[in-house]
Amino acid sequence: MDSDEIDKDSLQPDGKKKAARAALGALGGAIPFVGGLLSAGAAYWSESEQEDVVNVLRQWVQMLEDELREKGKTIAEVVARVDMHDENVRQRIESPEYQSLLKKVFRNWSSVDTEYKRQRVRNILANAAAAKTSSDDVVRLFLDWVGLYSDFHFEVVGEIYRNPGITRGAIWDNLGRPQVREDSADADLFKLLVRDLSFGSVIRQHRPTDYAGNFLRQQPKRSKPGEAPRTAKSAFDETEPYELTELGKQFVHYAMNEITAKIEFHEE
């Protein structure tokens, strides 16, 4: 092999270099603003660095594609569940108020981090389109709750909904959670969940009311001398009953009651 052939071969980029440049060009043309970044970085990054950049961008693009797919799936499932023959429903879906709900969902989509939450969002949007039991301000609050609370929070809400007046200990047992110490992280977490939901006006301890719905004052329970308990109240207390607030009941109606799909379809 002569020197001319060696020089010629050494100038040819290998397959990896070609692939990196092709990927850079494809990503630059597919994503707004990224093209300018890649053009500026082509002279700054080495070939190996360009490969690293391409790999990172591919992962991010895949993340965006997955998010777009989830949004599209949610919209399709909502449309499949509402009665499009109903003129009121069509007007509701096309209204600026409903479009505002959709925009709120998609702006905060990063908080919809599980399939369970995605289904809760779908149910809220479908119920908000089919009926207006609650105002849109309340529906916005429900969408905030989906992002704020975890799946474990919603398991607790569901258990209280199915068993009004249930105690914390019974909730824990019904959810199939193992017995743990009072000073354990699991006990602290459970107390935190109950406190979150109580402060958020989703649940409350049962309180009697009069005929007008006013809460009655409760007389504090006083222990006789020498009969005061030696330990603090358990995280899994078996005496104080819990119930949903009216907001909590409406949330269950919107988020946990699923409208049956009127159209069956499959992803292509």
Image (cartoon, rainbow, N blue to C red):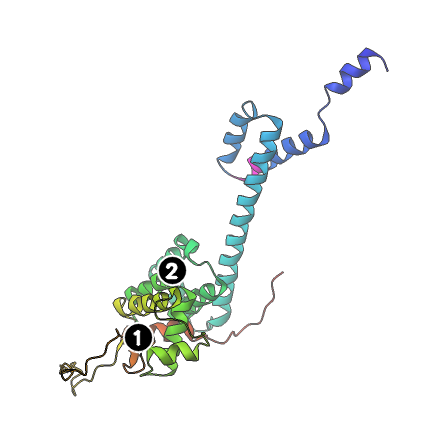
Is residue 116 something one can see in this rendering? yes
Disc 1 crowd rating (10 Å Cα; few below 14, some 14-19, many 20+) is: some
Amino acid under disc 1? Ser
Q: Give the distance between the C-alpha atoms of the residues marked 2 and 1, in whole angstroms.
A: 29 Å
- Image position of 125 with respect to 227: above or below: above
Is residue 133 something one can see in this rendering? no
Mark 2 vs mark 1: which is more N-terminal? 2
Magenta span main SS: helix
Residue 196 location in percent, x, y?
30, 66
Residue identifier under label 1: 234
Q: Is mark 2 on a helix, strand or loop?
A: helix
Q: Is mark 1 on a helix, strand or loop?
A: loop
Residue 101, located in which quarter of the rendered image? bottom left
User: Magenta span covers which residues?
Assistant: 27-31
**Residue at horizontal 29 percent and vertical 68 percent from the top:** 195
| Left or right of 16 on screen, residue 205 | left
Query: Which label sits on residue 147?
Result: 2
